[in-house]
Each structure stands twice: as structure tokens, then as C-alpha cells.
Amino acid sequence: MLDPQDRVPLYQQLADRIRSRIADGELEAGDRVPSEAELVAEYGVSRITARKSIGLLREEGVVYTRQGQGSFIGPEEARKARRRRGQRYVEIAEDLERRIRDEEWRPEPPLPSEQRFAQHYDVSVSTVRRAIAILRERGMLVTVPGKGTYLACD
């Protein structure tokens, strides 16, 4: 299920779930995406959340919508581009790890904001969040809700 307590908005969590289903091969190019009603029933979200998730995926080129027929996984070219973009967060995590090891930042104050990193790397904030999550899992960063992300003290 989705986590309403997570800092990542529900519509982004749902979009991530759909992307995972694509990456796992459960949904392929040309397949119909579950309808808003199906997403509501399956994930326990509001119709607005389901609609916003599909809208986000449409903006990213992952899905396209046909009037009166529903939304479908994008063509193979869009799927391949999505895969290439999908690895960008790993590259960003590696770059941030290098910068941490080079002591570019100190434990205080917090690191630059997610928005600033997103601008620097020319990616979405959700891509930056995924990169930061990798470094948190490795014990390199600590995020304090409402205060920011800090270097973890050894």
C-alpha cells in the first residue's frame, strides 16, 4: 500500500508504483493503464490522486491518453527513454557520494534543498529524492522533516 505519512505525495507514490509495474514487465507498451476507478479500488486513494498520478505520467511521456478509451503505456521509444532516465537518480547518488567523500559539505548546515539539487542536475525533485534515499540507506545522510538533509555523523 501507499504510505500517507511519507513526505512523498500520494500521487507521486502511485506514479512510482505504476512505473515499477512497467519496469517489472507487468505493463508493457500499448497496455491500458488501470482506470481511475481501478486505481482507487486497488490503492485506496481518492479519484483526484489517481487522476493526478496519470497526469504526471502523461507529462513524463510514460503514458498517453485516448479520449473515451483510457490511458496506455507509451510507445517503445518512450519506454526506452524512460529506462534511460530511470537510471539518472543512481548517477546523481554516485556524484553526491563523491562530493561528500571530497568533503564538499560539512555536517552543519543542511545540504542544499532538493529543489536546488533538481535545478543543478536538471531533473525532477522526485529523482533527487530517490538519489538521497540511496545515500540515506547507505548511512551517509540523515533527513530531519521540516529542517533538511544533513551529513550523517560517523
Image (cartoon, grey):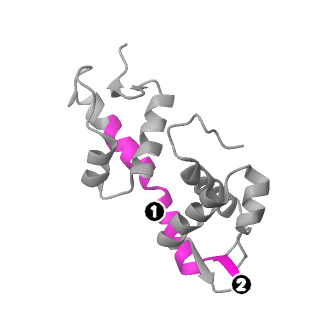
Residue under the image location 73 percent in, 69 percent down:
35
Q: Nearer the viewer, mark 1 or mark 2?
A: 2
Residue density around tag 1, few if under 14, some if 14–19, many if 20 or more, within 10 Å: few
Asked whether disc 1 touches disc 2, contact meaning CB atoms under 8 Å apart, the reply is no
Q: In front: 100, or 152? A: 152
Would you identify the image quadrant in which residue 41 lies?
bottom right
| Numbered circle sitting on residue 85 | 1
Left or right: 34 with respect to 15?
right
Q: Residue furthest top?
A: 154
Residue 17 appears at what percent x and percent y? 65, 54
Kind of residue at disc 1: Arg
Residue 90 appears at what percent x and percent y? 45, 48
Residue at disc 1, secondary structure: helix
Residue density around tag 2, few if under 14, some if 14–19, many if 20 or more, within 10 Å: few
Residue 70 appears at what percent x and percent y? 69, 79
Residue 107 appears at what percent x and percent y? 27, 20
Gap between marks 1 and 2 measured at Cα? 28 Å
Kind of residue at disc 2: Gln
Residue 105 seen from this side: yes
Left or right: 93 with respect to 7?
left
- Residue segment shown in magenta: 70-97
Q: Quadrant of the C terminus?
A: top left
Question: Does residue 62 sit above or below 69 in this rendering?
Answer: above
Residue at disc 2, secondary structure: loop
Q: Quadrant of the N terminus?
A: top right
| Numbered circle sitting on residue 149 | none
Q: In front: 8, or 101? A: 8
Q: Earlier in the sequence, mark 1 or mark 2?
A: 2
Residue under the image location 50 percent in, 58 percent down:
86
Residue 26 seen from this side: no
The residue tagged 2 is 69
